[in-house]
């Protein structure tokens, strides 16, 4: 009988990866992460350890090295095929070698190979990357260290082989993780939050501009590690100038200074006070089998699909009268409620909600390209800008094809994307929003989907910004070459980031400025930032590497669109910049060979796949294996990443928060409300924004129908009275969820004002008395 040592996989194979130590350094809105992966071979044969793991999709991987005993080897970036050949040659000759490469399908998946680790030997691998921190709608800066890698569904016929992932449930992950973060900013740090357990935040100075935080002990690998960092006065524009690399050629990206400019446009209040009442709103909802997973472990009864249904209810109730809309859903195939987008009316909203109520995660795999192509093939509606909302858990294998398609159609729409649950692909979610001129949001842990989606709906209802241009005012002889993609969308209070290479004589005491001009609702506007050209101290090459990553991603995308037409020339440029900057790309890899080890490592080489984490779905242990192999059909879950599945017993995750058939008295739209009081009230609202006076509304208010009717002022009709009561209840009892209902309340207030009803003030007083509130008419917007 074989005697296994150390940690074992579910296949009883020893795992050479023992621990991961991750140290994060955040400077304002740029993050540098250093991960140290510690390996040990406790077997009697040399090993090749292969670890497939996720990284943020927009990260610039810029350092890879290995420490074996006293020998330290720094990897070089080389063309991918050359790197792979050098790795194979090293192994065949008995040398130790290390290879780090990016997946060709998705830039957020990397493969690390530790080759020929001798028996009894230890190795420490250091991996470093830099990334920008995305600003969330609540002004928090989000950093995510992906810990969960859900194998991606590879659509039939898509380009390239699927990424082979060895995964186990979180409870069986055979290595430990430690994580710490140090944060510094010119502005005080208000707070740091996380979906994971953190030790108390420690400030390092009196003005609270430096702080440190650590992950609590015993991290269970059941979620990604997400940090939300909040600064005071976060919306301050800034510019960081970084000196070029002394050893690099002047005139090259790495040799010249690079500036990173962060702008936060503030729109005139007169424009922002009136949200758009037009637009075409297209909602695309993932109904693949994995959408039946719980949103989180603390509320397993709330599944991803049930939360999506609740969110669609809020969205549909919040749309303005006269706009156009449609709802698509997809899995292996796709469906749409209407053949093409229809005008938003009482009748069309009722039909849509009837369909939404019946949505289940029963459409199989995750084929998102087909519905996207169908949506883009539909003619746009004049004077109704198209806004696309995509809801998915992101288990997609053809990420680059999807984001390329969104980018190709960027001129016809704005794309808002939502990653649902642990392990959602950051490359997919962020890529769709970035290439579609919209905004990305992630719903993880105990997050509620509804407030984040409603925040994005507010952005979508903002007036479209047109004619965007960027100009520079620099000292004589100095010029700026913009390295970022052109800005295609600007939202109130959201950051616009610009990288530019500065060429010409350095003049550190001089100042420059950058101006972004645009047209907002027909009015010319601009935002300007003045900055000093003196390079920042201690910034290393972080800004250069982020700028290089931006250029590399842009060229990779262009190469894919031109494939077959001079693509080799573009690929050559990517490889050159990747090698020059030391930043990974899909055409390069990091390769390190230990040529100082003396004697060749003898013996047959044994491959060990290091398992990554698959989402902990709160399933019974004996069912975890079946979860991995179940078909993606109705009420089933699957984490296979091929296009075919073998059938086993499906796993039933009982759904949502109650039937929509709990009351008999309904609104004129015949929706059947949820048990949640807020969603029940929302479901009773009419498309116009009003409410009807009936028993179901009274029940939400905690009253009988007779009590509500008796309190009504004599001269006011039932509908106005019911609508005022609904507004009082929302403002009086649900202010903690205001982000969810604010838009539909604005619609209700507009409807009430349009009725020119008598005695509105008397109604508010009577409503306050009935419900025990003290709301003012002005506070209700009426």
Image (cartoon, rainbow, N blue to C red):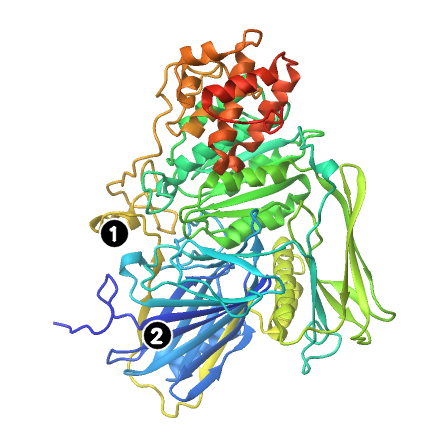
Mark sitting on residue 763:
none
Give the percent coordinates (x, y) of residue 281.
59, 32
The Cα–Cα distance between marks 2 and 1, rounded to whole angstroms, is: 26 Å
For mark 2, give the secondary structure. strand
Judged left or right of residue 506, residue 23 is: left
- The answer to whether residue 483 is left or right of residue 14 is right
Which residue is drawn at the image coordinates 27% and 40% (left, top)? 650
**Is 10 in front, or is 541?**
541
Circle 1: element type:
helix
Above or below: residue 463 compared with residue 577: above
Depth check, front residue: 748 or 559: 748
Residue 748 in percent (x, y) is at 58, 23
Crowdedness near tag 2: few (<14), some (14–19) or many (≥20) residues, C-alpha within 10 Å: many
Q: Position of residue 335 (x, y in %)?
A: 47, 31
> Circle 1 is placed at which residue position?
625
Looking at the picture, how far across and down is residue 310, in whole percent?
A: 44, 32
Q: Earlier in the sequence, mark 2 or mark 1?
A: 2
Q: Does residue 302 appear in this view? A: yes
Q: Which residue is mark 2?
A: 48
Mark 1 neighbour class, 10 Å CA radius: few under 14, some 14 to 19, many 20 or more: some
Q: Considering depth in this image, is 513 or 368 the residue closer to the camera?
A: 513
Residue 342 visible in the snapshot: no
- Classify residue 569 as left or right of residue 522: left
**Quadrant location of the N terminus in the rendered image:** bottom left
């Amino acid at each position: 009988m074989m005697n296994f040592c150390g940690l074992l996989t579910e296949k009883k194979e020893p795992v050479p990866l023992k621990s991961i130590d991750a140290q994060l350094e955040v400077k304002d809105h740029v993050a540098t992460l250093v991960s140290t992966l510690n390996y040990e071979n406790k077997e009697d044969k040399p090993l090749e350890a292969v670890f497939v793991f996720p990284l943020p999709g927009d990260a610039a991987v810029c350092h890879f090295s290995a420490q074996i005993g006293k020998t330290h080897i720094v990897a070089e970036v080389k063309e991918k095929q050359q790197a792979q050949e050098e790795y194979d040659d090293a192994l065949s000759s008995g040398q130790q070698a290390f290879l780090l490469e990016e997946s060709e399908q998705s830039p957020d998946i990397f493969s690390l190979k530790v080759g020929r680790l001798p028996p009894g030997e230890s190795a420490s691998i250091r991996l470093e990357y830099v990334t920008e921190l995305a600003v969330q709608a609540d002004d928090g800066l989000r950093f995510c260290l992906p810990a969960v890698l859900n194998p991606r569904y590879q659509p039939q016929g898509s380009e390239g082989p699927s990424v082979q992932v060895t995964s186990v449930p979180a409870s069986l992950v055979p290595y430990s993780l430690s994580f710490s973060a140090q944060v510094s900013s010119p502005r005080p740090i208000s707070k740091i939050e996380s979906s994971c357990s953190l030790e108390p935040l420690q400030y390092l100075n009196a003005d609270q501009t430096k702080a440190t935080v650590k992950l609590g002990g015993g991290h269970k690998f059941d979620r990604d590690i997400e940090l939300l960092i909040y600064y005071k006065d976060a919306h301050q524009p800034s510019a960081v100038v970084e000196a070029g690399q002394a050893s690099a050629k002047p005139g090259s990206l790495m040799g010249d200074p690079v500036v990173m400019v962060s702008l936060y446009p503030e729109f005139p209040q007169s424009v922002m006070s009136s949200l758009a009442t037009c637009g075409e709103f297209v909602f695309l909802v993932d109904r693949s089998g994995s959408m039946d997973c719980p949103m989180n472990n603390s509320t397993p009864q709330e599944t991803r699909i049930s939360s999506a249904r609740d969110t669609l209810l809020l969205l549909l109730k919040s749309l303005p009268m006269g706009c156009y809309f449609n709802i698509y859903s997809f899995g292996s195939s796709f469906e749409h409620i209407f053949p093409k987008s229809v005008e938003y009316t009482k009748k069309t909203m009722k039909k849509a909600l009837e369909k939404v109520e019946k949505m289940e995660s029963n459409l199989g795999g995750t084929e998102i390209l087909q519905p996207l192509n169908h949506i883009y093939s539909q003619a746009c509606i004049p004077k109704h800008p198209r806004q696309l909302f995509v809801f998915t858990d992101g288990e997609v294998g053809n990420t680059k094809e999807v984001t390329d398609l969104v980018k190709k159609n960027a001129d016809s729409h704005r794309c808002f994307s939502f990653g649902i649950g642990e392990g959602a692909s950051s490359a997919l979610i962020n890529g769709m929003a970035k290439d579609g001129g919209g905004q990305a949001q992630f719903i993880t842990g105990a997050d509620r989907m509804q407030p984040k989606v409603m925040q994005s709906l507010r952005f979508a209802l903002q007036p479209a910004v047109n004619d965007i241009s960027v100009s520079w005012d620099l000292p004589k002889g100095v010029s700026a070459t913009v390295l970022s993609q052109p800005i295609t969308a600007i939202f109130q209070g959201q950051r616009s980031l610009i990288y530019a290479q500065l060429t010409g004589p350095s003049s550190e005491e001089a100042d420059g400025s950058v101006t972004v001009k645009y047209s907002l609702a027909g009015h010319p506007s601009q935002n300007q930032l003045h900055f000093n050209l003196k390079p920042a101290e201690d910034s290393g090459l972080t800004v250069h590497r982020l700028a290089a990553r931006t250029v590399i991603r842009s060229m990779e995308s262009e190469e894919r669109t031109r494939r077959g037409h001079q693509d080799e020339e573009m690929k050559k440029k990517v490889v050159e910049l990747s090698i020059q900057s030391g930043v990974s790309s899909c055409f390069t890899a990091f390769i390190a060979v230990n040529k100082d080890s003396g004697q060749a490592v003898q013996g047959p080489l044994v491959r060990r796949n290091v398992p990554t984490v698959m989402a902990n779905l709160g399933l019974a242990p004996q069912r975890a294996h079946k979860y991995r192999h179940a078909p993606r059909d109705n009420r089933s879950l699957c984490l296979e990443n091929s296009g075919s599945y073998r059938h086993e017993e499906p796993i039933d995750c009982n759904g949502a928060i109650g039937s929509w058939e709990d009351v008999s008295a309904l609104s004129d739209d015949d929706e059947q409300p949820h048990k949640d009081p807020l969603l029940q009230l929302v479901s009773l609202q009419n498309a116009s924004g009003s409410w009807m006076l009936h028993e179901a509304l009274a029940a939400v208010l905690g009253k009988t129908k007779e009590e509500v009717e008796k309190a009504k002022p004599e001269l006011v009709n039932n509908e106005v009275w019911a609508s005022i009561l609904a507004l009082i209840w929302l403002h009086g009892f649900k202010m903690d969820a205001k982000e969810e209902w604010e838009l539909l309340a604005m619609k209700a207030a507009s409807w009430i004002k349009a009725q020119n009803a008598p005695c509105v003030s008397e109604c508010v007083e009577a409503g306050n008395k009935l419900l025990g509130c003290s709301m003012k008419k002005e506070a209700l917007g009426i």
